[in-house]
Image (spheres, rainbow, N blue to C red):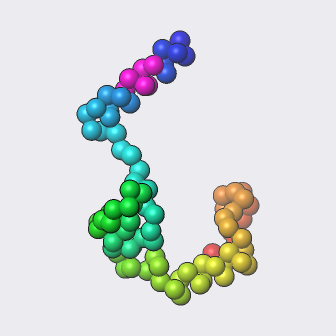
């Protein structure tokens, strides 16, 4: 039964690829900005980012993020409801 299920999943994925419906994630090898470099080395215009204010690479924001990680680490051990909210919030 399990083998049949996996085979059906494989068939469905192959069909999606053949029909151009399978989405591969683009690997971005540069900073997020208007022009980005992707894994194959080509440079493309980034029309799909949420960085419309151009702040993703702003030096002051990068410095603030580094300072926050130095003082509080990276991420929570759990959701706010269980562990509480950090004072940086």
Q: Residue furthest left?
A: 19
Q: Nearer the viewer, residue 81 or 38?
A: 38
Main secondary-structure element of the magenta-colored stretch: helix
- Quadrant hosting residue 88: bottom right
The residue lying furthest to the front in this view is 41
Let me know if residue 9 is in the magenta part: yes
Screen quadrant of the C terminus: bottom right
- Residue for point 29% across, 68% down: 45
Q: Position of residue 20 (x, y in %)?
A: 27, 38
Q: Position of residue 85 (x, y in %)?
A: 68, 68
Instruction: Tell me if I can see residue 81 in this picture.
Output: no
The residue positioned 70% from the left and 57% from the top of the image is: 78
Against 6, is 44 above or below?
A: below
- What stretch of residues is rendered in magenta? 7-12
User: Is 26 located above or below residue 62 in the figure?
Assistant: above
72, 22: nearer the viewer? 22
Q: Is residue 81 magenta?
A: no
Return the x and y of residue 18 as percentages of the image width and height. Answer: 28, 32
Q: Is residue 5 left or right of residue 68?
A: left
Residue farthest bottom in this picture: 60
Residue 15 pos. (x, y %): 31, 28
User: Which residue is the extreme one toward the top?
Assistant: 1
Asked which quadrant contains residue 39, the reply is bottom left
Residue positioned 55% across, 16% down in the render: 2
Dividing the picture into quadrants, the one containing residue 28 is bottom left
Q: Nearer the viewer, residue 76 or 21?
A: 21
36 relative position to 79: left or right: left
User: Along the horizontal axis of the image, is 73 left or right of 15?
Assistant: right
């Amino acid at each position: 039964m399990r083998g049949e299920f996996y085979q059906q999943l494989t068939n469905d994925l192959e069909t999606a690829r053949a029909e151009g419906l399978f989405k591969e994630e683009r690997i971005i090898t540069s900073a997020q900005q208007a022009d980005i470099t992707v894994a194959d080395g080509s440079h493309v215009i980034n029309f799909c980012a949420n960085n419309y204010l151009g702040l993703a690479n702003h030096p002051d924001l990068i410095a603030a993020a580094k300072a926050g990680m130095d003082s509080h680490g990276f991420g929570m051990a759990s959701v706010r409801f269980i562990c509480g909210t950090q004072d940086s919030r």
